[in-house]
Image (cartoon, coloured by chain):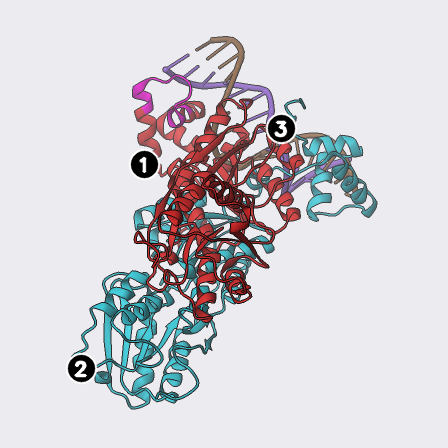
Chain colours: A cyan, B red, C purple, D brown
Amino acid sequence: MSKPHKSITAQDVANHAGVSRAVVSRALSDKGSIAPETKTKVIAAARELGYQVNFLAQGLNRKRSQLIGVVVARIKDPFRSSLLEGLIHMIQRRGYQALVTEVNSEKELEATMRQFTQFRVSGVIVTSGQPPATLVNECVQFKIPVVGINRQLDIPLVDFVCSDNQQGAALATDQLLKSGCHSFAWLNYAGSTWAGLQRGVAFEQALESANFGANSVKRVIAEQDGYEGGEAAALAFDLSQGLPNGVFCANAQLACGFLDGMRQRGFDAPNDFHLIGFDNTPQTAQYSYRLTTLNQDISALCSEALNCLESRNKSPNQAARLVRVPVSLVLRHTSPVINLG
Amino acid sequence: MSKPHKSITAQDVANHAGVSRAVVSRALSDKGSIAPETKTKVIAAARELGYQVNFLAQGLNRKRSQLIGVVVARIKDPFRSSLLEGLIHMIQRRGYQALVTEVNSEKELEATMRQFTQFRVSGVIVTSGQPPATLVNECVQFKIPVVGINRQLDIPLVDFVCSDNQQGAALATDQLLKSGCHSFAWLNYAGSTWAGLQRGVAFEQALESANFGANSVKRVIAEQDGYEGGEAAALAFDLSQGLPNGVFCANAQLACGFLDGMRQRGFDAPNDFHLIGFDNTPQTAQYSYRLTTLNQDISALCSEALNCLESRNKSPNQAARLVRVPVSLVLRHTSPVINLG
DNA sequence: TTGAAAGCGTTACCAA
DNA sequence: TTGGTAACGCTTTCAA
């Protein structure tokens, strides 16, 4: 039907408007000086011809594309997919495009980071995995900003945005104490993320400053992450010393699994124990769970991550920043306002 | 510390290996003839210098990047995030990279598709929204293949991969009948996707061929999609004519919500009714739901989608294909093997 | 088989 | 303020 579509270039627009290619570039990019009237003329011509910048050529010349690389893992996990959604949303809103890569091993991450540099991305957001310092250094050498979310990348010049785990643990502890709990459990999984570990430490510290010593909190480490891990932990839970009445979980999936596991053994929250989990995922709000959770402010996390990238873009050598984003307690059924019966 | 990192170009490799730039290109791309020994020599030199092709320059020259555009919406929805995970996985596996864009309105979709062409993507996968024919045509003119997943894009030269909704509805009907159901409900939401509508039609047809006429199935249309929609539909369900004992839902989220809504009214599956939903999301397997569902073969869907793109890349003008991917019934608690009591 | 050279489409520098 | 021109880094004819 329609012919092979010779794509319209800046030169075509220039011809149409009776100016040079250079002027077209200036008119459309707001860089360099240009007479207001020629500018409108060019813009009109561009619109008329349906001109679209070739991002490949643009990037090649500017040594930077408007792509932002995003490293993720296990996207279908509820919190991670919410975070990814927020990131993509924010990336688009700020005029970039998301180059999303799933990574399940450090080897893959290495290849990925390399591909990001090959596309001359404007920044890299790491939400999973521990990028090898050498790779990040490669980015740094290309002056590509890197930011980590909810993980500590202990590398110079790499920023880092994180939900306030200490505050979260304190809120949870406070709530458990106020509702009358006096024996506790902490549930995490083996090989937990850095964030998970931090939450555990903070929980024990918060209890300690309320005069509950280390032996008042039972540490439970599930063999795997996610709902299945939590469920298995509950099913295997040693009840010989009774069930702790205040349980705090490293994440929402573990918490849901733990709750369902306990139900299978005839226990339920809030009657037999109180339960609080991190990450306010959609599922935790559902009738069958109604978990009291700590809500991570996803849009703030994403927004701050992009702030870091843009800020470091301006001054690449500034000291590494650590941005803490406040969390909030969402009171629901598994740890209600009322006291423990 | 380390200097501003002058990036290594093909020219550097050429110098190092004592050949011309052109030879380097051939050695690394397997295009054009080259002596085996020079090839190994060049590859050695490239590795030694740590050479990485600049994808921007490569794409500019080839008029095609190794990017694949993916259009998604509401990523945090469990089925969609699983699908996205599968797509990204498959895209990477086949040597491409995923340019992911979230789209919530047709306007946005239009802008998105445009940006895809500006990046000269190798293909576009649409999992959400109805791209305007004109836009798709633009892609077609750039010879960019477009494929839709679980939706009918009724546009020439656009392929289309879809779970077999008819088969799914037949499997569900069969199961409901075998377990003794004789009155039915169909739950969908207003403004449902094409796939949802198709499932409803197929369900009614399957019932009809089993001699259950149109008045044996009650159509329930929730005001919104997702868990909340299903829950609200259950809470508002008119029970004056009793509760149908076989309920089929357009998707898993609606089904979970409906189940929880009914529980709030004192009814539960499988005792008071049987329930089957489409999409075997992780949540449906959990103890609190244990939904009998129709499993979509995500990895097959993704694989077929990429097959379509690659095939159309070879012969751009072949007739539009429709690939149907079989689904399977996952029997769980809400519609068990045993008969209705 | 190899190398020289002409693009690919844009931006940025430098004169005019 | 403008236009010419040289990059940007790669691929791909076309001769040799």
Residue type for callout 1: Glu
Residue type for callout 3: Gln
Residue type for callout 2: Gln
Q: Which mark, by number, is residue B48? A: 1
Marks 2 and 1 sit apart, C-alpha to C-alpha, by 62 Å
Residues indicated by labels 2 and 1 sit on the same polypeptide chain: no
Stretch in magenta: B26-39
Q: Which mark, by number, is residue B141? A: 3
Q: Is residue A158 visible?
A: no
Q: Which chain is indicated by disc 3?
A: B
Q: Which chain is indicated by disc 2?
A: A
Q: Nearer the viewer, residue A181 or A24?
A: A181
Residue B303 in the image, given as x and y percentages of width and height: 40, 36
Residue B58 in the image, given as x and y percentages of width and height: 49, 32
State if disc 1 and disc 2 touch (CB < 8 Å).
no
Badge 2 local density, few (<14 within 10 Å), some, or many (20+)?
Answer: few
